[in-house]
Amino acid sequence: MTQIGILLQAAYKINIEVFLTFGLVVAIIIAARFFDNNKKRFLFFGIGAILGIPLSYYFQSEMVKNKMGGVSGYLQNFDQILRNSDLIGNVVISIIIFAIVGGVIGYFIDENEAKKEK
């Protein structure tokens, strides 16, 4: 069994929402240590991770999109999405992708500001 499978089994034994929230907090703490003095990188990493939750709607199958009736319905029924093991992978991947994209955008902003200061 993969590490992700083990983590998902642990998540189902405890409350999945608590597990996901804890994971986001740990990721933000790690990002804060990694990005250290680069405030834009950290800010955009966090914004990307948070935006990854509603934008994960676009990574779901057409069946889920039709059942939820849009992003607002998706967010209202997000607890059902988190309880479905087939759908949670798309949510996690979306959060990771958008966090990385946000971190990259913050990196280029930090680099641009560093060039202006020199």
Image: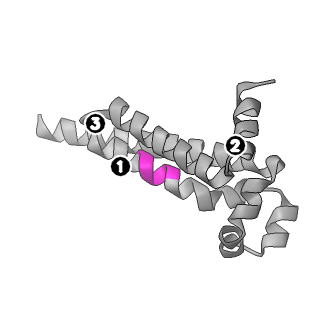
Residue 30, how many percent across, how many down?
42, 34
Q: Residues within 10 Å of mark 2 (few under 14, many from 20)?
A: some
| Screen quadrant of the N terminus | top right
| CA separation in Å, label 1 and label 2 | 27 Å
Residue at position x 58%, y 42% from top?
A: 96
Q: Earlier in the sequence, mark 1 or mark 2?
A: 2
Measured from the top left, where is residue 46 in percent x and y?
A: 43, 49
Badge 1: residue crowd in 10 Å (few <14, some 14–19, many ≥20): some
Label 3, on which residue? 111
Q: Secondary structure at mark 3?
A: helix
Query: In this picture, is 24 found above or below 10?
Result: below
Q: For the magenta stretch, what is the residue range?
A: 45-49
Residue at the spot of label 2: 11
The residue that disc 1 covers is: 43
* Frontmost residue, 59 versus 46: 46
Question: At x 84% / y 70%, what residue is drawn?
Answer: 66
Q: CA distance from mark 2 to mark 3?
A: 38 Å
Majority SS type along the magenta span: helix
**SS state under label 1:** helix
Do the numbered discs 1 and 3 sit on residues whose CB atoms are within 8 Å?
no
Disc 2 + disc 3, Cβ < 8 Å: no
- Mark 2: which amino acid? Ala
Tell me, yes or no, whether the highlighted magenta stretch contains residue 102. no
Of badges 2 and 3, the one in the foreground is 2
| Labels 2 and 3: the sequence-earlier one | 2
| Residue count near mark 3 (Cα–Cα under 10 Å), binned few <14, some 14–19, many ≥20 | some
Q: Earlier in the sequence, mark 1 or mark 3?
A: 1
Callout 2 secondary element: helix
Inspect the image, locate mark 3, and give the three-letter code of the amino acid beneath it: Glu
- Image quadrant where residue 42 sits: top left
